[in-house]
Image (spheres, rainbow, N blue to C red):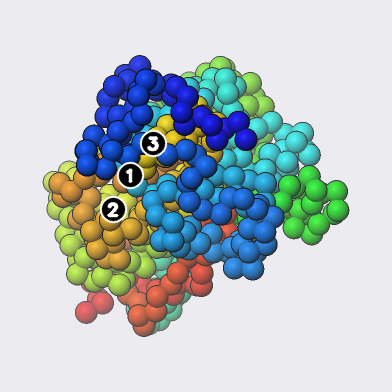
């Protein structure tokens, strides 16, 4: 293997780094062996790629073991275990897919500095295969290289820049108010002055209503009693799509397609449902836009803004808007469900958050955007939820230059993964990681590369600002109206279905504030 010799050949680091101390405490130069400057007594040299601990020699055997451990549903726990066994860096090969895994925030910083101009993450092959199969364009999620960059730059302006956030807030606030009104109604109907339920279905609808109102500038009406069966079908398709992705992650989908595997057929059917529903929404707006004269000064939504901007092809716009719509349902609703679960387990914390929201409300008299600036603990709660219950088990990049992590040399081109779930629960990274403490995000303890729930850098989650705002507003409205409680103290764990989900239903009781005591 040519790569194994690299450790003794010159390593190219970015100019700004030459001669600097790297975070791993290693000074590297091409003319002399690297020395650990911070521990002069140990004068260790940088170790070759080959010596990184881990199971990377027999991909097929590892895939078999992985399957035996039910790895398809336990990926997050297996990763955390591997860090316990091998330490803060390990190499791995499962099937045909090889990676180096890291856990420390300081190492994450080195990784992201080496992501290059066209950051590339692990390709989710079932998703690209589907698009190839049906001749759909890739959106910005699946694109790479210059095509990715040029699309992403334009989308950033309409989706994630602070400039457009102000347009989203009133739309999302309205959905939040409607959600609360719906819950009040459910409580009334129960005749018991409370509502005990698995909220996930309601949260899915809240999330889809929210992301749609921002994308299309129009309401779908999912907070009403009668809901469009197509919308429900869309929600169900997303769940199936995620569920059928993970078993195909380590087996080439092309192969599964040729043998006519059920999991591939179900996957195709799910994406078909997603695409046809998104297409209906997009066609609607497109038609309306051609009829209207465009004189209204109301914000028309992301899709209409992109169409009017006329900088991306309609096919490119459709592809990325579909991804935003599909990516914006389970991710935010599950995060909100975990947050309510944590608040139900911590009644005092819930009161503390409620007090913060009440004070912010009183100080801002209806200026909801200003209010969002005055709820740091609510924001901390969401970060804390994503620390313990991240949507993505890992962040990955193919590095574009050689790097040194934990004193090991890693050659350019390697897939390096940060174990996000494992990092969030590592006592060396977070003090008392098992405790849900939103206030840790307000204190002065280091936050350096620790809040990575939406990824990092130019390839971070495009929907981040929509998701954050939607979730903050949800919590504000819920805290202002209800107290959330739990029956028994049951621990709920995560299961991996491409994204991390609660392994069993979370049943909560919602009581109106005034009369719940
Ligand atoms: C899943 O080993 C585990 O925002 C794999 C590595 C991996 C790669 C890409 C990640 C994926 C994991 C989890 C789900 C993510 C995805 C990238 C985008 C996607 C994090 C960690 C998500 C949920 C958006 C999905 C949009 C889609 C429905 C159009």
Residue lying at 47% horizontally and 24% vertically, measured from the top left: 9
Residue indicated by mark 1:
105
- Dot in front, 2 or 3: 3
Residue lying at 35% horizontally and 80% vertically, measured from the top left: 489
Residue lying at 57% horizontally and 20% vertically, measured from the top left: 146
Residue lying at 23% horizontally and 50% vertically, measured from the top left: 441
Q: Contact, CB < 8 Å: mark 1 with mark 2?
A: yes
Of the pair 511 and 343, the residue shown nearer to us: 343
Q: Can residue 433 be seen in this view?
A: yes
Of the pair 145 and 480, the residue shown nearer to us: 145
Which of the labelled discs sits on residue 429, or is there none? Answer: 2
Label 1 within 8 A of ligand 1 by Cβ: no
Residue 290 left/right relative to 105: right
Quadrant for the N terminus, please: top right
Which of the labelled discs sits on residue 46, or is there none? Answer: 3
Q: Which of marks 3 and 1 is nearer the N terminus?
A: 3
Q: How crowded is mark 3: few (under 14 residues within 10 Å), some or many (20 or more)?
A: many
* C-alpha separation, residue under disc 2 versus residue under disc 3: 24 Å
Which type of secondary structure does the marked residue at label 3 adopt?
loop
* C-alpha separation, residue under disc 1 versus residue under disc 2: 8 Å
């Amino acid at each position: 293997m040519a790569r194994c010799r690299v450790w003794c050949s010159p390593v190219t680091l970015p100019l700004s780094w030459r001669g600097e101390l790297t975070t791993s405490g290693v000074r590297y130069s091409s003319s002399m062996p690297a020395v650990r400057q911070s521990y002069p007594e140990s004068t260790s040299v940088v170790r070759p790629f080959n010596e990184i601990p881990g199971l990377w020699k027999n991909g097929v055997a590892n895939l078999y073991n992985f399957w035996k451990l039910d790895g398809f549903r336990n990926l997050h726990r297996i990763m955390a275990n591997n860090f316990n066994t091998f330490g803060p860096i390990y190499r791995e090969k499962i099937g045909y897919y090889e990676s180096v895994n890291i856990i420390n925030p300081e190492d994450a910083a080195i990784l992201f500095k080496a992501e290059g101009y066209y950051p590339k993450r692990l390709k989710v092959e079932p998703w690209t295969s589907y698009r190839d199969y049906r001749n759909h364009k890739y959106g910005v999620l699946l694109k790479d290289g210059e095509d990715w960059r040029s699309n992403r730059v334009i989308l950033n302006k309409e989706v994630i820049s602070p400039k457009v956030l102000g347009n989203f807030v009133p739309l999302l606030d309205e959905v939040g108010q409607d959600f609360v009104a719906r819950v009040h109604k459910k409580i009334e109907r129960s005749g018991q002055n409370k509502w005990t339920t698995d909220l996930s279905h309601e949260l899915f609808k809240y999330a889809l209503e929210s992301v749609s109102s921002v994308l299309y500038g129009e309401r779908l009406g999912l907070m009403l009693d009668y809901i469009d069966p197509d919308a429900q079908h869309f929600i169900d398709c997303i769940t199936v799509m995620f569920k059928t992705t993970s078993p195909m992650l380590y087996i080439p989908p092309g192969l599964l397609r040729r043998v006519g595997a059920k999991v591939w057929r179900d996957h195709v059917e799910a994406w078909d449902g997603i695409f046809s529903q998104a297409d209906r929404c997009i066609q609607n707006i497109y038609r309306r836009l051609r009829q209207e004269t465009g004189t209204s000064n109301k914000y028309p939504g992301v899709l209409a803004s992109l169409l009017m901007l006329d900088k991306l092809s309609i096919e490119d716009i459709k592809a990325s808007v579909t991804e935003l719509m599909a990516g914006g349902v389970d991710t935010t609703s599950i995060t909100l469900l975990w947050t309510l679960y944590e608040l139900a387990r911590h009644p005092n914390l819930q009161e503390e958050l409620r007090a913060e929201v009440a004070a912010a409300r009183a100080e801002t008299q209806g200026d909801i955007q200003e209010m969002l600036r005055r709820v740091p603990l609510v924001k901390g709660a969401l970060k804390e939820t994503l620390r313990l219950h991240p949507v993505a088990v890992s962040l990955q990049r193919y590095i574009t230059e050689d790097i040194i992590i934990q004193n090991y040399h890693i050659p350019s081109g390697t897939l390096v993964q940060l174990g996000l779930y494992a990092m969030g629960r590592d006592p060396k990274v977070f003090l008392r990681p098992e405790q849900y403490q939103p206030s840790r995000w307000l204190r002065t303890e280091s936050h350096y590369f620790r809040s990575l729930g939406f990824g990092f850098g130019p390839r971070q989650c495009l929907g981040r600002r929509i998701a954050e705002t939607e979730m903050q507003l949800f919590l504000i409205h819920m805290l202002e109206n209800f107290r959330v409680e739990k029956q028994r103290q049951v621990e709920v764990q995560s299961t991996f279905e491409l994204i991390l989900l609660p392994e069993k239903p979370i049943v909560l009781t919602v009581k109106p504030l005034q009369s719940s005591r």
